[in-house]
Amino acid sequence: MAQNFGSKRIVVGAHYGLRDWLSQRVTAAVMALFTLAVIVQILLPGEMGYDKWAGIFSQQWMKVLTFVVIVSLLYHVWVGMRDVWMDYVKPVGIRLALQVFTIVWLVGCAGWAIQVLWRL
Amino acid sequence: MSETLKPRPTHRNIHISQIVKYRLPPAGIVSILHRVSGVGMFLLMPFIIWMFDTSVTSEISYSQFTSVFTGGLGILPGWVFKLIALGLTWAFLHHFIAGVRHLWMDMTHAVTKEFGHSSALATLGLSLLLTALLGSKLFF
């Protein structure tokens, strides 16, 4: 075998996306559980209004779960949007710009959502 | 070294001009709508967080949240926001059900041609039905 390190290294044989595929499914399962937790609490008796709605998210366990969901969503959407750009956008420069936009957009959104959650 | 660099097969997407003529099976429709709904929710994420922010922060902001859907905001009437919410409802339901279908197939290896077809039709029908039910609560 010829030299396969340094500048001559053949860049193949990474993890082939298994980690991203798996994390997208794990984060999806977390978000599905969160959805069910919210739906069950909406359906509990009591008139829907500010007190009931904000009360759902002000419990400590829901704050923790919502935080985990925000971070899960961040990674889930990153994998998904990156797949979309990789499939449809071939020029490297435009693809990189869209990926940078995606990261900035998602981190900004996650920060805002966590800020809302924090002050409840 | 040469065997690791053998040419790999390339698979091209269909050209954009072929999309209208290209007849997709139900599973293909579910698949592309999974992407469309995901990208849509990604782009509308600030609106979703705005709804979360105003609806939970205080009673005053909660009434601002509801008044946008009844009275509108600026030059935009309330029904525009209801329509956006309806679109988001469908996007979430379709993405959720199509995602559960994926997870089910991954876990059970239920990947027969028949199951792919029938579960795709169920995904399309169920997401539209639930959207109609929740939409009727939103508009009436």
Image (cartoon, coloured by chain):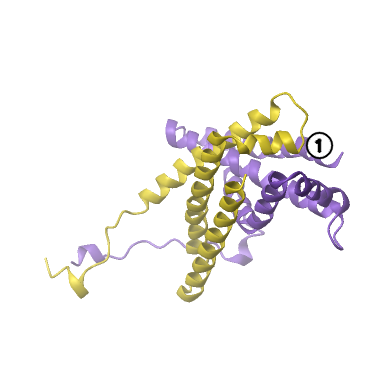
Chain colours: A yellow, B purple
Q: Which residue is at a point 62% across and 38% down the rendered structure image? A: A57
Nearer-the-camera pick, B14 or A56: A56
Q: Quadrant of the N terminus of chain A?
A: bottom left
Say few, some or many: other residues with alpha carbon within 10 Å of mark 1 (under 14 / 14 to 19 / 20 or more): few
Residue A83 percent across, percent down from the top left = 48, 58
Depth check: give the residue in front, B50 or A83.
Answer: B50
Q: Amino acid at mark 1?
A: Lys
Q: Residue at x 58, y 53 (%)?
A: A115
Would residue B35 be seen by someone viewing this image from the given angle?
Answer: no
Query: Is residue B96 shown left or right of residue A22?
Result: right
Residue B6 versus residue A67 in the image, above or below = below
Rendering coords of residue B109 (x, y %): 43, 33
Residue A22's x, y, as percent? 40, 44
User: Which residue occupies 51% across, 39% down?
Assistant: A64
Q: Nearer the viewer, residue B41 or B51?
A: B51
Is residue A77 in view from this perspective? yes
**Is A10 situated above or below B131?**
below
Residue found at x 55% / y 42%? A66
Quadrant position of the C terminus of chain A in the picture: top right
What residue sits right under mark 1 in the picture?
B137
